[in-house]
Amino acid sequence: MDLMLTESADPGGRHLAQRLWNYWDELLTLLDHPEVPPANTHMKRNLRPAVI
């Protein structure tokens, strides 16, 4: 990951690498806690009627 932060000539690539680095632990939460769903689709569906 460190190499991606320093070697990429593409600003978008550097930005993505930096965000992955910053949020790596949060991205892998579902691996440590199987009760955490991998997506928030269920929650979005619950909110949709309130918005409409």
Image (cartoon, helix red, strand yellow):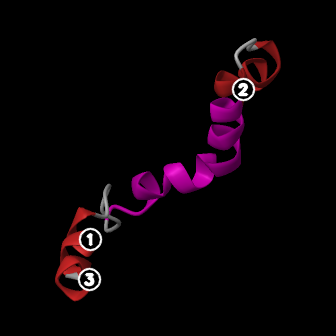
Q: Are marks 2 and 3 in contact (CB under 8 Å)?
A: no
Whichever of callouts 1 and 3 sits on the residue coming sooner in the sequence is 1
The image's mark for residue 51 is 3
When asked about the image quadrant of residue 10, the answer is top right
Judge left or right: residue 33 versus residue 5: left
Q: CA distance from mark 1 to mark 3?
A: 10 Å
Which residue is label 2 attached to? 14
User: Given the current orientation, which residue lies at the most extreme right position?
Assistant: 6
The residue under the point 60% across, 52% down is: 25
Relative to 41, residue 3 above or below: above
Residue 9 location in percent, x, y? 75, 11
- Please tell me whether mark 2 or mark 3 is closer to you in this view: 3
Judge left or right: residue 1 versus residue 50: right
Relative to 49, residue 4 above or below: above
Q: Amino acid at mark 2?
A: Arg
Whichever of callouts 2 and 1 sits on the residue coming sooner in the sequence is 2
Q: Tell me where the magenta segment starts and ends, as one range.
A: 15-34
Please say whether residue 51 is one of the residues in the magenta stretch: no
* Element marked by disc 2: helix
When asked about the image quadrant of residue 26, the answer is bottom right
The residue under the point 30% across, 62% down is: 37
Q: Amino acid at mark 1?
A: Lys
Q: Nearer the viewer, residue 22 or 46?
A: 46
| Main SS category, magenta section | helix
Q: Nearer the viewer, residue 34 or 41?
A: 41
* Element marked by disc 3: helix
Which residue is label 1 attached to? 44
